[in-house]
């Protein structure tokens, strides 16, 4: 069931999303050569707790940290570790969220550490831009497939592929609610988009093939062909006047 949010609920959700965005920005600004992924995780966690919120990934299906931090060929769900040191040239995807007064926020971005290759830069730019294409397609009266189609078209035109095995999602009192929001699809297909729907749109884009595999740790998702991957995510609400991004600092 898709839950439409009321104005009162959106007010709380806006705050959960602001905290999520602020935490992502803080962790992202700390990306530099020599920093560990555990240190980035701690920065985000400290901030979220300081706002009276809780890190909503922690303990979700047993997930052990605040953030998922995935480097280079890692697509999503990388587990922060004090032994994982970031180096210049890495692209670092950070995904995290906060729960505030019963409502969730969720967002992600890929950050460059030092000088990254022009190829990596283009992948990151394309992925970020594809998220905004998807958001622009999230309009009342449209269909869910419009979002995925917009993302997919933008990405594939530039020679990259969209991950199929993981998708975006509805969000609210649960981190993951209906509907699933694929980053691929067909215009005009799927459920009707309506005001009050809150969605986490999150394209995962691979430089090579879209196939992925899960590491023996049971979490980290890698590209099967070893190619680079980027990930951007916003939580949005569909309003009568168009989509609105909630995960803004
Ligand atoms: N990052 C996922 C999402 O955006 C959720 C994380 S799953 C967790 O939907 F277990 F790592 F929390
Ligand atoms: Co999400």
Image: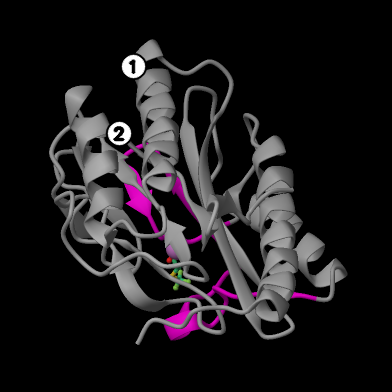
Considering the image in quadrants, where does the N terminus appear?
A: bottom left
Residue at the (38%, 22%) spot, across then down: 120
- What span is in magenta? 53-81
Residue 38 spot, x, y in % from top left: 62, 56
Q: Residues within 10 Å of mark 1 (few under 14, many from 20)?
A: few
Residue 50 spot, x, y in % from top left: 86, 68
Q: Is residue 67 magenta?
A: yes
The label on residue 119 is 1
Residue that sits furthest to the top in the current view: 118
Residue at the (25%, 69%) spot, across then down: 191
Comparing 75 with 179, the one in front is 179
- Residue 159 visible in the current orientation: no
112 left or right of 77?
A: right
Disc 2: residue Cβ within 8 A of ligand 1's nearest atom? no
Residue 138 spot, x, y in % from top left: 40, 52
- Residue 190 visible in the current orientation: yes
Colour scheme shown: one colour
Rendered position, 68 above or below 7: above
How far is mark 2 from mark 1, CA to CA?
Answer: 9 Å
Instruction: Name the N-terminal-most of marks 2 and 1.
Output: 1
The label on residue 228 is 2
Count of all numbered marks drawn on residues in the image:
2
């Amino acid at each position: 069931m898709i839950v439409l949010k009321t104005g009162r609920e959106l007010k709380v959700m806006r705050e959960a999303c602001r905290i999520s965005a602020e935490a992502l920005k803080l962790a992202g600004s700390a990306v530099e050569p020599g920093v560990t992924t555990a240190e980035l995780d701690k920065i985000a966690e400290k901030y979220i707790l300081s706002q009276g919120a809780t890190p909503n990934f922690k303990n979700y299906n047993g997930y052990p940290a605040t953030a998922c931090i995935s480097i280079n060929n890692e697509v999503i769900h990388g587990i922060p570790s004090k032994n994982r040191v970031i180096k210049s040239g890495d692209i670092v995807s950070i995904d995290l969220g906060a729960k505030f007064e019963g409502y969730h926020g969720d967002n992600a971005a890929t950050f460059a550490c030092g000088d990254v290759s022009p190829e990596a830069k283009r992948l990151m730019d394309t992925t970020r831009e594809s998220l905004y294409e998807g958001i622009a397609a999230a309009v009342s009266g449209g269909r869910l497939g419009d979002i995925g189609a917009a993302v997919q078209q933008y990405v594939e035109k530039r020679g990259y592929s969209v991950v199929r095995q993981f998708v975006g999602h509805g969000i609210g009192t649960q981190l993951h609610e209906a509907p699933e929001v694929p980053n691929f699809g067909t215009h005009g297909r799927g459920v009707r988009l309506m005001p009050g729907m809150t969605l986490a749109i999150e394209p995962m884009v691979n430089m090579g093939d879209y196939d992925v595999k899960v590491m023996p740790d049971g979490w980290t998702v890698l590209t099967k062909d070893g190619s680079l991957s980027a990930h951007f995510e916003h939580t949005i609400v569909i309003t009568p006047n168009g989509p609105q991004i909630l995960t803004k600092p």
